[in-house]
Image: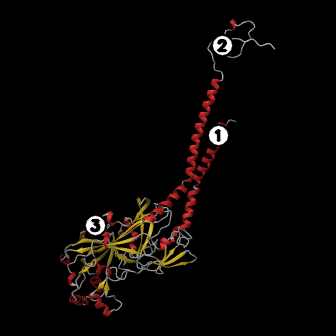
């Protein structure tokens, strides 16, 4: 066997093995299964896990942008007209949220943690100085007192109204952004504090929230089931809440929004428990996006999250008392926030009933600026970018016994909204890209084998064709006629032997004698 034939046979054998092994690995998905199994084991909230440290001390910077609605026509509104507001801001704060008192429970299957949050003002990302800028907004303590007086005798209310008026307190107040956000000593609350010491005499939208936590959490580590990774087991020792009017609405579902299980599918719903909203919400897949060179799935709350119970009956449980429901796009949370009739929505009443948008001048909802969304890397479940946007509103309406409200048209009045943003930092993004490259190469290794087999198959075809051509050429030249001169045996001498083959034009030579 020639060397060329050996090369052809060897190439054929190697090619066949590569194609058989590669196709078998592709069909069986051996490497993909191996990668998935590895991810399920590695992405857990255990001390040995590579993601534990980033969960404990999140590296991406979180920014809180506060926007306020300055009331431009308070007298007109109190006289029965339409309120008009102007958005000012943002006033941006860097948020720090390390997890503290981390303790593992039940053989490492659960972990206890506190999540205190602290805020530092960032002037370069802000539109002004919160300690200087002044805004006019609804006097929430005043409205809270009026709301509380609804349960009192009608004849008591006018006296309370007169007393409040004597203090110089009005339905609308003018304060600095810093005071409204972080607190000030309120004259009305100070008077009530003397009678009821449990009532705080200070008021602020973020009063006592700088350096404090939202409750005690116990999370599943994902050690037993990767789908439970990061899910909340209990919040303040509760597995379900008691404020809402149905068991489904009271359920504490999902994670706190900072982590999600690996291997996310486009068709699944992701659940987040929002302690500040006193409820869980779900997010659905929207589209594929790219953030810093990383492919991600965008998830956002669908329209049915805050939809009217008539259109989405599952939301009936959020009507408290049962049957007393607001329209689409708003949620009354005063059931878990004692005091004023607080209502939350998306900024500018995005996705809300047009009646709420048209009731206040200055509302301009749009998806780009007011949608809440989460961009997740589907393989690891790591949030790459997040924008949580929520608006705080208050119900203003006529209260019998309070003359200043007698002309007010009931309105869900916007106070402010917050845009909480976080994007993966450059170092983490670089590490993520490297990890995903390794995962992609390992997952596609069977395809590389198949590709190499196909290349060898092409080489085999080329070698075989070339070998065939050379063999044919050799067969053609084995009996090639050297001269075209005919072999005329009639002219040969009688003693000349007959020659077999072609005629060669040479003179006969006599054999030499010994």
Point out which mark residue 7 bears: 1
201 and 152: which one is in front? Answer: 201
SS class, disc 2: loop
As drawn, 236 above or below 153: above
Residue found farthest to the bottom: 195
> Relative to residue 66, is residue 299 drawn left or right?
right
Label 2 to label 1: alpha-carbon separation: 43 Å
As drawn, 146 above or below 292: below
Residue denoted by label 2:
505
Which one is closest to the eye, mark 2 or mark 1? 2
x%, y% of residue 132?
25, 78
Which one is closest to the eye, mark 3 or mark 1? 1
85 and 292: which one is in front? Answer: 292
Q: Mark 3 or mark 1, which has the lower sequence index?
A: 1
324 and 330: which one is in front? Answer: 330
x%, y% of residue 436?
50, 59
Label 2 to label 3: alpha-carbon separation: 111 Å
SS class, disc 1: helix
Q: Residue at x 27, y 84 (%)?
A: 142
Q: Quadrant of the N terminus?
A: top right
Point out which mark residue 354 bears: 3
x%, y% of residue 298?
41, 62
């Amino acid at each position: 066997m020639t060397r060329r034939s050996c090369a052809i046979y060897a190439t054929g054998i190697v090619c066949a093995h590569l194609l058989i092994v590669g196709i078998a690995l592709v069909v069986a998905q051996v490497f993909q299964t191996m990668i998935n199994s590895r991810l399920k084991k590695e992405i857990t909230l255990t001390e040995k896990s590579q993601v534990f440290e980033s969960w404990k001390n999140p590296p991406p910077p979180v920014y809180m942008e506060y926007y306020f609605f300055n009331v431009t026509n308070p007298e007109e509104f109190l006289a029965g007209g339409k309120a008009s507001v102007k958005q000012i801001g943002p006033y941006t704060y860097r948020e720090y949220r390390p997890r503290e008192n981390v303790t593992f429970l039940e053989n490492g299957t659960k972990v206890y943690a506190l999540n205190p949050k602290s805020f530092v003002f960032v002037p370069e990302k802000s539109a002004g100085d919160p300690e200087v800028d002044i805004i006019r907004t609804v006097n929430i303590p005043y409205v809270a007192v009026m709301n509380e007086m609804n349960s009192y005798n009608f004849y008591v209310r006018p006296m309370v109204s007169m007393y409040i008026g004597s203090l110089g307190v009005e339905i609308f107040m003018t304060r600095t952004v810093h005071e409204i956000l972080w607190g000030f000593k309120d004259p009305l609350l100070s008077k009530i504090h003397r009678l009821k010491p449990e009532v705080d005499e200070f008021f602020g939208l973020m009063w006592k929230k700088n350096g404090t936590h939202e409750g005690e959490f116990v999370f599943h580590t994902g050690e037993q089931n990767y789908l439970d990774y990061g899910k909340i087991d209990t919040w303040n020792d509760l597995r379900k809440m008691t404020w809402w009017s149905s068991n489904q609405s009271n359920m504490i579902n999902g994670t706190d929004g900072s982590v999600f299980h690996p291997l996310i599918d486009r068709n699944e719903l992701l659940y987040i428990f929002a302690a500040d909203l006193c409820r869980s919400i779900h997010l659905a897949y929207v589209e594929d996006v790219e953030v810093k060179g990383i492919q991600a799935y965008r998830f956002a709350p669908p329209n049915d999250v805050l939809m009217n119970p008539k259109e989405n009956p599952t939301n009936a449980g959020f009507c408290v008392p049962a049957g007393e429901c607001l329209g689409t796009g708003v949620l009354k949370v005063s059931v878990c926030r004692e005091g004023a009739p607080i209502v939350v929505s998306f900024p500018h009443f995005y996705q809300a009933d047009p009646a709420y948008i048209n009731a206040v001048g200055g509302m301009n909802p749009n998806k780009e600026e007011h949608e809440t969304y989460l961009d997740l890397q589907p393989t690891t479940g790591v949030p790459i970018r997040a924008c949580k946007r929520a608006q705080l509103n208050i119900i203003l309406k006529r209260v019998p016994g309070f003359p200043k409200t007698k002309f007010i048209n009931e309105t869900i009045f916007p106070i402010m909204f917050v845009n909480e943003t976080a994007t993966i930092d450059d170092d983490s993004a670089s590490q993520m890209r490297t990890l995903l490259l390794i995962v992609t190469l390992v997952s596609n290794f069977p395809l590389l084998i198949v590709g190499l087999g196909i290349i060898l198959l092409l080489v085999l075809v080329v070698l075989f064709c070339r070998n065939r051509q050379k063999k044919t050429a050799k067969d053609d030249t084995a009996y090639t006629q050297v001269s075209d001169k005919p072999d005329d045996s009639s002219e040969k001498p009688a003693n000349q032997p007959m020659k077999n083959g072609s005629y060669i034009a040479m003179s006969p030579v006599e054999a030499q004698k010994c």
